[in-house]
Image: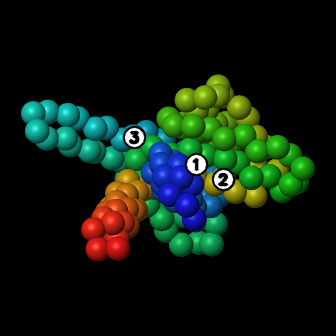
């Protein structure tokens, strides 16, 4: 891989960040209402606070959803197009429907009987920071190797 193609790849990976997804039964979605992430900046200090909500996954295990998330309902019929709701996501059960709203969409009802589950995706700041550190280290090593090759080559 040439240096020209490596730099845009690194920038693209870091800009996108790392995300973590879990599958949640549609009826669990209202438990995630109020999820938030808040970063407060002060003199030489930044404080990140996140809500942590506990839900049951489709496989029956428990999962923690940290901070804001996006949600994508998955239908039993794979031909139905997927809609993604961006943070902040709010949902409620209204009779036979799951009604979801997000930062990018207004309230939208979905028949519970038609849903397999909802994919909940969160941004993983710690994994992104670890990846940035790893890539930064690799770039530094590569730069050092090029410098040594120029000096002693």
Mark pair 2, 3: CA separation: 19 Å
For the question of whether residue 94 can be seen, the reply is: no
| Mark 3 to mark 1 CA distance (whole Å) | 15 Å
Question: Which residue is under mark 3?
Answer: 36
Crowding around mark 3 (Cα neighbors within 10 Å: few <14, some 14 to 19, many 20+) is some
In the image, residue 3 lies at what x, y percent?
50, 57
Dot 2 or dot 3, earlier in sequence: 3
**In the visual, does 97 lie left or right of 64?**
right
Give the residue at x 62% y 38%. 85
Please, is residue 61 above or below residue 19 in the view? below
Q: Which residue is mark 1?
A: 29
Check contact, mark 3 vs mark 1: CB within 8 A: no
- Please identify, in this view, whether the residue under mark 1 or under mark 2 is nearer the observer: 2
**15 and 74: which one is in front?**
15
Of the 4 image quadrants, the one containing the C terminus is bottom left
Give how far across and how far down residue 12 sits, in percent: 53, 49
- Sooner in the amino-acid sequence: mark 3 or mark 1: 1
Can the viewer see residue 73 in this picture?
A: yes
Q: Earlier in the sequence, mark 1 or mark 2?
A: 1
Quarter-wise, where is residue 149 in the image? bottom left
> Would you say 119 lies left or right of 110 here?
left
Q: Residues within 10 Å of mark 2 (few under 14, many from 20)?
A: many
Query: The N terminus lies in which quarter of the figure?
Result: bottom right
Q: Which residue is mark 2?
A: 118
6 left or right of 81 in image: left
Q: Position of residue 95 (x, y in %)?
A: 72, 39
In screen coordinates, is 12 left or right of 24? left
Q: CA distance from mark 1 to mark 2?
A: 8 Å
Q: Are marks 1 and 2 in contact (CB under 8 Å)?
A: yes
């Amino acid at each position: 891989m040439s240096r020209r193609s490596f730099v845009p790849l690194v920038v693209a990976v870091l800009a996108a960040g790392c995300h973590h997804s879990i599958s949640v039964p549609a009826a669990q979605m209202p438990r995630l209402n109020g999820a938030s992430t808040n970063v407060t900046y002060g003199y030489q200090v930044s404080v990140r606070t996140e809500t942590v909500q506990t839900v049951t996954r489709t496989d029956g295990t428990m999962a923690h959803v940290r901070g804001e998330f996006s949600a994508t309902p998955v239908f039993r019929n794979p031909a139905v197009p997927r809609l993604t709701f961006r943070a902040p996501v709010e949902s409620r059960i209204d009779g036979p429907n799951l009604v979801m709203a997000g930062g990018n969409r207004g309230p939208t009802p979905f028949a519970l009987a038609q849903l397999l589950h909802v994919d909940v995706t969160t941004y993983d700041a710690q994994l992104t920071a670890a990846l940035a550190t790893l890539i930064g280290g690799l770039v530094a090593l590569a730069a050092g190797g090029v410098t040594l090759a120029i000096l002693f080559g």
